[in-house]
Amino acid sequence: MIVKEVSFPSADGTLQMYGDLSLPEQQEQSLTDELLPAIVIVNGSGPIDRNGDIPQMKLKLNTSNQFAKHMAEERPKDRAIAVLSYDKRGVGKSKKKGDKNLFYRTGMLDIVLDAVEAVRYVFAHPRIDKSKIVLMGHSEGAIIMPIICREVKKAGLTDIFGCIFYAGFGETLEKALELQRETILADVQMEKGVKG
């Protein structure tokens, strides 16, 4: 597998968004190979980087890069899939110099439109089949996928081929937030003393 760091402009054009494009090795070496389907990962809530980690909390899950490795390297060669994962605005390399609060000022629409720019990048890549671009949204990313699909269409790009809803809500947002609040409260109440 070849992992290339790539960049594309943010939706508002104020910074470069950085990420990793994972391609199977033989596809990168020969331009005569068939075009690849691609998956664009839309991460969940919080300051999540291209690997699926939360660097500010020193939380390393490596979910995105493990997924990319599986799709590009561990599948049969004739069924490999390219994967683009990127640092959210204000996280990793997708930052403005000297602006430490960019992530916290980023709105939901910014996240949606940055995802559209990620799709635009993949759409223009010479090894990608434009008709087979799939979104994989995790948590918040799954919740906003229908909006991203609508915005991709409004941007004049080919419709998204499919969506993978990974750990999206199976209930209303209100009930999910209530459950999260109760879980956090129970966890905090069980802690004794100062930790960390």
Image (tube, rainbow, N blue to C red):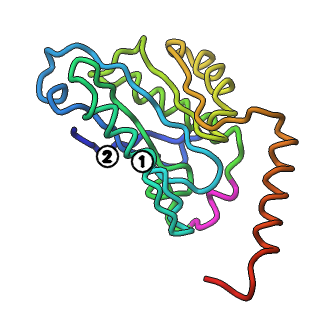
Residue 41 placement (x, y as % from top left): 49, 36
Q: Is residue 48 left or right of residue 80?
A: right
Quarter of the image containing the N terminus?
Answer: top left
**Label 1 Cα crowd, 10 Å radius (few <14 / some 14-19 / many 20+):** many
Q: Is residue 169 above or below residue 192?
A: above
- Furthest residue toward bottom: 193
| Residue bearing the label numbered 1 | 18
Q: Is residue 116 above or below residue 174?
A: above
- Hey, what amino acid is under mark 2? Glu
Q: Is residue 8 left or right of residue 126?
A: right
State the extent of the magenta-drawn residues as a range.
Answer: 99-105
Label 1: which secondary element: strand
Q: Is residue 164 above or below residue 53?
A: above
Q: Residue at x 61, y 34 (%)?
A: 113
Q: Are marks 1 and 2 in contact (CB under 8 Å)?
A: yes
Which residue is more in the foreground, 120 or 134? 134
Quarter of the image containing the C terminus?
Answer: bottom right
